[in-house]
């Protein structure tokens, strides 16, 4: 979608001249590269200390300014840890829309499904992780452990 918008703007510039481009509305386009990602060190420290309220305050500010999978994933994780499963699901979904191969978001979404008793959906995340890391990875192992601890496969 963002590339279609950029293509449209570019074509407008070519056909209508650059003065017409300045009259076009500004579109919010996320071209953030991983090197431009916000510093999440403070958020991760708060999460490690189980200061979920503090992490949420910081993450909400970051989410307003950054449409970035890591921010949305940590927002989902923090909300899940506070028991807000519905909103947590929304943020995991946003993270995966931006980056379908985000392994941590797949793991945490699977853990959300385990916590809410939706084991078939948790297994879908296991299948996705197996495709993302066929030789295995920490995210896959952690989700499988969570499923096993709940009495699943």
Image: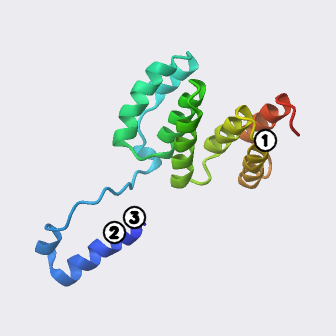
Residue in the picture at 21% in, 84% down = 15
Q: Nearer the viewer, residue 117 or 39?
A: 117
**Residue labelled with disc 3:** 2
Q: Do the residues bearing badges 2 and 3 touch, measured as CB atoms within 8 Å?
A: yes
**Residue 64, position in %: x, y?**
35, 40
Which of the 4 image quadrants contains residue 39? top left
Report the number of discs: 3
Residue in the picture at 51% in, 17% down = 51
Q: Is residue 57 above or below residue 29?
A: above
From the viewer's perspective, is 129 left or right of 101?
A: right
Q: Do the residues bearing badges 3 and 1 touch, measured as CB atoms within 8 Å?
A: no
Q: Residue 6: which disc?
A: 2
From the viewer's perspective, is 99 left or right of 10?
A: right
- Earlier along the polypeptide chain: callout 1 or callout 2? 2
**Residue 124, position in %: x, y?**
75, 50
**Separation of residues labelled 2 and 3 (CA atoms):** 6 Å
> Quick one: SS at disc 2?
helix
Badge 1: how crowded within 10 Å, few (<14), some, or many (20+)?
many
Of the two numbered discs 3 and 1 in the rendering, the one whose residue sits closer to the viewer: 1
Of the two numbered discs 1 and 2 in the rendering, the one whose residue sits closer to the viewer: 1
**Residue labelled with disc 1:** 119
From the viewer's perspective, is 63 left or right of 17?
A: right
Badge 3: how crowded within 10 Å, few (<14), some, or many (20+)?
few
**Separation of residues labelled 1 and 2 (CA atoms):** 41 Å
Q: Is residue 8 above or below residue 93?
A: below
């Amino acid at each position: 979608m963002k590339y279609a918008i950029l293509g449209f703007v570019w074509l407008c510039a070519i056909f209508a001249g650059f003065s017409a481009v300045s009259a076009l509305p500004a579109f919010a386009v996320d071209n953030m590269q991983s090197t431009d990602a916000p510093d999440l060190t403070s958020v991760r420290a708060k999460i490690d200390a189980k200061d979920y309220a503090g992490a949420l305050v910081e993450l909400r500010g970051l989410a307003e300014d950054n449409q970035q999978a890591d921010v949305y994933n940590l927002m989902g994780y923090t909300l899940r840890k506070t028991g807000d499963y519905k909103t947590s699901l929304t943020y995991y979904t946003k993270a995966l829309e931006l980056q379908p191969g985000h392994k941590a978001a797949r793991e945490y979404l699977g853990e959300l499904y385990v916590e809410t008793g939706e084991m078939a959906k948790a297994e879908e995340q296991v299948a996705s992780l197996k495709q993302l890391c066929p030789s295995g990875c920490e995210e896959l192992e952690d989700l499988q452990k969570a499923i096993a601890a709940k009495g699943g496969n």
